[in-house]
Every structure is written in structure tokens, then in C-alpha cells.
């Protein structure tokens, strides 16, 4: 059986569990990281030398890094659903997956979610927070323009790009921060909320993280 290591309130673990849910894969979830520990154990380091979650094991195959895991699971279990043999089609979602990880995620998760929500009020650096909010505004406005006339990130069909970008939305729309008018993003967000795996694995409370720099 597929095994998934990680804590459910980890942003990157949520991406993996969301896809596992979309594919309907029987799996064992093993809490790890934060208060669950395990990351520095020799057994875990043998799987991932970086000591980070998520990590999966599938029939003896170990995979770490969330986007590598998404691609692996989609290729292995999601052919003709969430994976394509066409290199050009894969590139269409690859650039959005990479953009979400290198541009959107640092601006939101690092500067805003960590800088504002997870940092105790007296320790907040508002220059970093405001920079992150401004970057998020630019990124989400670009995304709003892109989504005009589309049901999902790449058109009519749900894809890995929806998972990597869409995982951000639940936290972004539930923080007390300034947000621009994003009609197309909001319609897309409402569409994602209709998917049971999104509700099960992304739309979960995160208030236990408020003001906590540890896990």
C-alpha cells in the first residue's frame, strides 16, 4: 500500500494528499514532522536525506519533494486522467507548477503566511509582510487574467497545475489581509471547493499555527 509521511497542516503535504484523494488511492498516512517528530531519525533520513516532508513509498520506491511526488503519482496512476504522454501538454502544466513553487509560494507562504500569520505579533516585520502582500497581489492578478474563460488552470480539465496553485487559495482567502478584486480566481476557487478531496485535505483548520514559529 502507498505510504505518505507528513503532517496534514503542511502546505506541501496537502498537495500530495489532495492528489491521492483525486486518484482514489488506498494509502497509509504516517504523521511526521512538527510535533510528530521522526524527521531526524536514521530511518527517515535514509528515505530523505534532507529530513523534510512529504515523502512517499510506493512498492519500495521512495519519492520526496512535493512536485516530484505529484508527477510520479500522476504518471503511475493517473494516465489519461492527470498525466499525458505528450511532452507539450506536460509542459503546459509544468510551467505553472514551477511558477507556483518559485514565485507564488515564496511570496505567500514565506512573506505573508509565515511573516504575518505564524509570527507572533510583536516579532512581525511589516516591511517583509507588505512586500509579500504586494507580490501576491501581482501574482493573483496575473492568475485572474489567465483564468478568464477557463474552468480550470488549463481550460476544461482539472490538472496538476490546479493542485499546485489551488492549494494556496484556502489560506489566502482566509487571512485578514488586503486582497485585490479577483472574480475569475474566486469562481475557480468555488469550483475547487466542490471537489471532495480538496475539502478533505486542503480546507482544514490552520488556527493551531497562529503565532507559532515552531510546529
Image (cartoon, rainbow, N blue to C red):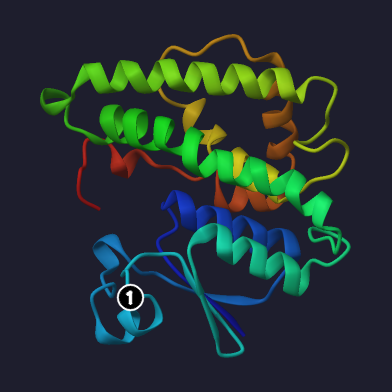
Q: Is residue 81 left or right of residue 124?
A: right
Q: Residue sitting at 74 percent across and 64 percent down?
A: 23
Query: How many marks are shown on the rendered structure?
Result: 1
| Residue 199 horizontal side relative to residue 5, left or right | right
Residue for point 86% across, 59% down: 86
Q: Which picture quadrant has residue 208?
A: top left
Picture coordinates of residue 104, whole percent (x, y): 50, 33
Judging depth in this view, the residue of 174 and 49 nearest the camera is: 49
Can residue 190 be seen? yes
In percent of the image, x 49 and y 34: which residue is there? 103
Which quadrant of the rendered structure holds the N terminus? Answer: bottom right
Above or below for 20 versus 104: below
Residue 47 quadrant? bottom left
Q: Residue furthest bottom?
A: 60
Please, what secondary structure does the residue beneath circle 1 have? loop
- The answer to which quarter of the image holds residue 75 is bottom right
Q: Position of residue 100 (x, y in %)?
A: 55, 39
> Local crowd at mark 1 within 10 Å, few (<14), some, or many (≥20)?
few
The answer to whether residue 169 is left or right of residue 8 is: right
Residue ID for mark 1: 49
Q: Is residue 129 above or below residue 36?
A: above
Looking at the image, which residue sits at the far top? 181
- The answer to whether one can see residue 167 in this image is no
Q: Residue at x 32, y 69 (%)?
A: 50
Q: Residue furthest front?
A: 88
Q: Nearer the viewer, residue 131 or 211?
A: 131
User: Would you place residue 63 above or below residue 74 in this image?
Assistant: below
Q: Position of residue 83 (x, y in %)?
A: 79, 61
- Give the left or right position of residue 2, taking residue 93 as reference: left
The image position of residue 215, as x and y in percent, is 25, 53
Amino acid at each position: 500500500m502507498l505510504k505518505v509521511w507528513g503532517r496534514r497542516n503542511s502546505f506541501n503535504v496537502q498537495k500530495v494528499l489532495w492528489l491521492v484523494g483525486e486518484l482514489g488511492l488506498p494509502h497509509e498516512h504516517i504523521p511526521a514532522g512538527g510535533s510528530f517528530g521522526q524527521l531526524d531519525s536514521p530511518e527517515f533520513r535514509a528515505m530523505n536525506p534532507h529530513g523534510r516532508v512529504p515523502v512517499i513509498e510506493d512498492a519500495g520506491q521512495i519519492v520526496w519533494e512535493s512536485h516530484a511526488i505529484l508527477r510520479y503519482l500522476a504518471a503511475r496512476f493517473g494516465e489519461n486522467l492527470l498525466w499525458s504522454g505528450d511532452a507539450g501538454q506536460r509542459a503546459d502544466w509544468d510551467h505553472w507548477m514551477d511558477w507556483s513553487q518559485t514565485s507564488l509560494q515564496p511570496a505567500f507562504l514565506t512573506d505573508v503566511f509565515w511573516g504575518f500569520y505564524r509570527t507572533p505579533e510583536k516579532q512581525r516585520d511589516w516591511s517583509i509582510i507588505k512586500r509579500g502582500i504586494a507580490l501576491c497581489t501581482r501574482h493573483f492578478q496575473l492568475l485572474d487574467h489567465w483564468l478568464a474563460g477557463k474552468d480550470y488552470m488549463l481550460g476544461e480539465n482539472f490538472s496538476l497545475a490546479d493542485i499546485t496553485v489551488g492549494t494556496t487559495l484556502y489560506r489566502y482567502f482566509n487571512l485578514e489581509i488586503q486582497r485585490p478584486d479577483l472574480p475569475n480566481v474566486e469562481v475557480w476557487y468555488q469550483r475547487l471547493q466542490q471537489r471532495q478531496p480538496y475539502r478533505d485535505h486542503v480546507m482544514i483548520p490552520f488556527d493551531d499555527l497562529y503565532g507559532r514559529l515552531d510546529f
